[in-house]
Image (cartoon, rainbow, N blue to C red):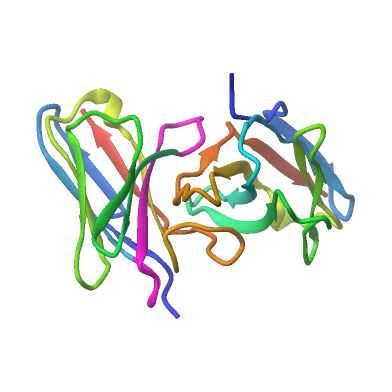
Amino acid sequence: AQKITQTQPGMFVQEKEAVTLDCTYDTSDQSYGLFWYKQPSSGEMIFLIYQGSYDEQNATEGRYSLNFQKARKSANLVISASQLGDSAMYFCAMREGLITGGGNKLTFGTGTQLKVEL
Amino acid sequence: DAGVTQSPTHLIKTRGQHVTLRCSPISGHKSVSWYQQVLGQGPQFIFQYYEKEERGRGNFPDRFSARQFPNYSSELNVNALLLGDSALYLCASSLEAGGGNNSPLHFGNGTRLTVT
């Protein structure tokens, strides 16, 4: 089974609108972390937001928020007030074994290509 | 402050050759990880090094090796290159060996390797 599933290969959103990028995950660990990264066409991976499995509140970072539903094993990224510069590939990733020492192994999904239009 | 720097940015090699990719972490970061990103896919974990010791290894053949130097920079070596090794190789650094929000991975721009 896929550990990280991103079911939207591509998404379109109009400038200034909000958009939700879906991510579901699969793990038997009790302690894990979920990340979202943005990858522009230049190739670098830009860290956006993090949610720990024991965090009770949804993470927020500026225009980014993470809609964490633990029982459903979903960690959707919400981008508010989309900008043209938000056009990029977005990856959801998971780090397992935070307590047992999972190290820096992140498991990534296949990504969602977001296109922001005027 | 400088981010994670990788060199070279692009590289073209022939099947069977050997390649060395280099990475300098963010100042103060002691952990370096390497990822391979094949076109159209998410990055795949190759190695993690922390304080010069290997802390994790992904499902890659022994042709892939890495090391970390006393200044925390790192090299990824790939021997006997195959066409399938063509990919973007990303280096990431973090303050600690692993954790949560306190130690997110910061990635470099990557080295794009083409094997012909």
Residue ID at (79%, 40%): A70
User: Residue reaching furthest right?
Assistant: A17
**Quarter residue B30 falls in:** bottom left
Q: Residue furthest bottom?
A: B1
- The quarter holding residue B85 reads top left
Q: Is residue A5 left or right of residue B8?
A: right
Which contiguous range is marked in magenta?
B25-43
Dominant secondary structure, magenta: loop
**Residue found at x 63% / y 50%:** A35
Q: Nearer the viewer, residue A105 or A71?
A: A71
Is B59 above or below relative to B7? above
* Front residue of B51 and B34: B51
| Quadrant of the image containing the C terminus of chain B | top left
Residue at 59% from the left image edge and 42% from the top image edge: A93
Q: Position of residue B13 (x, y in %)?
A: 17, 37
Quadrant of the frame with the N terminus of chain B: bottom left
> Residue A15: horizontal and vertical position, in percent?
84, 52
